[in-house]
Image: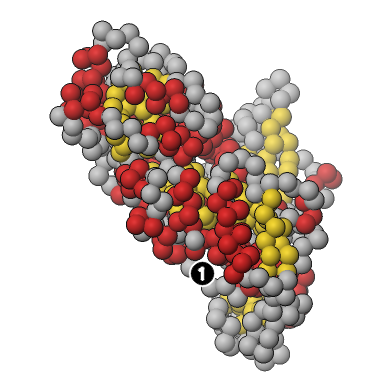
Amino acid sequence: MKKFRIAATLLSTVFAIGTAPVLLTACNGQNGAKVEVVYHLNYDDAGERKVNIPAGSTAVDWNATRDGFKLKDWYTDKACKKEYDFSKKVNGKLNLYADWTVYEGKAAVTFNYNYPGSRSPFTVSVDKGGKVAERYAPTADKVSRLGMKLDGWYKDADCTQKWNFETDTVSGDTTLYAGYTVNNDIPRNSKGEIIYENVQVNFWLANNGKGQAIFAKLAEQFNKEYEGKIHINATANLADQKTFALRLQSTPEKSVNENTYYSVSDIYAMAGIEYSLDDWYEGAVRDSVYKGALTSVPMLASVPYVVYNKTLMQKYSGGKLPANYSELSAVLKKAYEGEKNNADFKSIMTNTGWTFKEATSAAAFLQNGAEYYTYDEDNALFMSDWNKSEVRQGAETALENMYNLFGVNGDCHGGTGTDGEYEDALTVKAVKNGNALMCLVNYASSNDLINGNENLGVMPLSNLFTDSTDADAARIPVHTFGLAFYNGATNVSNIQLTAGAVFADYCSKHSEMFTEEGWYPVRKSCTDTEKFDAKYKDLLKQIGNPENFYTFNGYTAGKRIVNTICAEKFIVPMLTERELNFAQKAAEMSESIGFEINN
């Protein structure tokens, strides 16, 4: 219920925050403590107003103004679905978002920048039946697109009907779409094809053991095929950042600094390379896409899986592998009872280093329908669904099942090892020696510990953390790596960027080569297991269906939410706690996730 609204006039799009007057109601301050209220005007190029009010008081229902629009209400989410109640006391930072509607007799005209990953559309209000003043249209400098120049505004997204600002009129809400032509700074033949003549491309192979040898081999192979046209200089030595645009990157790590990378969608468009997200497995490449734009070229995945002792599995289940959480917990309990005279025995184990935290730790939540965050395409914003009762219940189930498997007082009598970040040697050794029935292998660099051992079996993570039969139950969280284009490489020309794109596309189409080192290709055309390297073929066939591989949406806060907040702050410490309230733990996680997204 609203108390009152204080009028204020918006003098410009962007506020001088420091001189804004403080808006507040009667003070109920708690020892003088202050909290911040941020009013987001919530449209393209709009500013925000920040005010400090006494903790425990109520915020002002500010009557902000916008030319041609009237304020509908204030909301606690950018999509304007959760209306704010101004009778509530404010005891912590509060973000409010304005929702607008055009005045009667007016129409909203939206300028859509019309390419994947573009900035949010810009909307103005004009008279119905009137013309759109051309001065309202965003200028070329605001519609800058790599390798492209603005050609004008169109009535349709395919840019077949150009809008005439002199004669066309508006009958109702209207969307105009930007059209583009290719810049002329790249040499092309009469067919518009790029002419490459000994173009040199520096390619940085991050020194972290993620397929560098394969990329180096691909570069050598590519250079022979493109001799005299394009030459790839592949190196782990980042001598001069300004000359290295093309880089091998961990996808979540790249996403942390999303704004420092070019859109691959733009570079591919400039290079004339056609692609579809359907070229790759949908779930595996979600972290390669940011707000609709491809931001790295997906290459390979490290897939976590379960390894088990065949002798013990035969002893306690007749060799039958569990197909859901109930079956898994039953065989683990049976094995523990049968081996309890062995003081070192744990039914199932995992390490809790980086490799666990970065991907595997999310398995129970993904399989129980409690994804940490999602992306709302219609409103172009990231959000959490944990406020929904069914999602919160899924989170509670995930926490309980994870604890029962690996917690110190878990029903299944599992445990955690102390392996390093990139290997699972100790937990695999426990399975080999009969001191554990199973363990999680969290990273592909541990594949050699299992490969070729006749008493070790392999099974995928799908369905093991839930009894649900929904499609979510089969999800397997994976680590992914791809090629990205650093936009701080200021000494790299557009033709070098397009040449790098040609090489990236080449690597993607030959990514079955990564199986030589135990990595899984995520391009569909490269996952015919008959193409896999013989050394790891049998293992890779068993670790999961690539249709079930899953990553979180590309997001600057994604790595922090998955790794630092959910895994490091909650999941890993939880496994050593002796008394737990899973509903309370889920509520605390939800609050932390929501705070990260909203701030």
Type of the residue with mark 1 = Tyr
Picture quadrant of residue 161? bottom right
Residue closer to the observer: 351 or 8: 351
Find residue 31 and report its horizontal and vertical position in percent.
71, 20
Is residue 578 at all visible to an observer of this figure? yes
Q: Is residue 286 left or right of residue 257?
A: left
Helix, strand or loop at label 1? It is loop
Find residue 516 and report its horizontal and vertical position in percent.
46, 48
Find residue 96 and report its horizontal and vertical position in percent.
62, 46
Find residue 6 and report its horizontal and vertical position in percent.
69, 48
Q: Is residue 241 left or right of residue 345?
A: right
Q: Quadrant of the C terminus?
A: top right
Residue closer to the observer: 496 or 12: 496
Q: Residue at x 54, y 29 (%)?
A: 421
Q: Which residue is mark 1?
A: 275
Q: Is residue 542 left or right of residue 86?
A: left
Residue closer to the observer: 304 or 117: 304
Picture quadrant of residue 338? top left
In the displayed structure, would residue 589 be above or below residue 112? above
How crowded is the residue under tag 1: few (<14 C-alpha within 10 Å), some, or many (20+)?
few
Q: Residue at x 83, y 44 (%)?
A: 18
Picture quadrant of residue 33? top right
Q: Residue at x 70, y 58 (%)?
A: 233
Is residue 80 at all visible to an observer of this figure? no
In the displayed structure, would residue 222 be above or below residue 137? above
Q: Residue at x 66, y 29 (%)?
A: 55
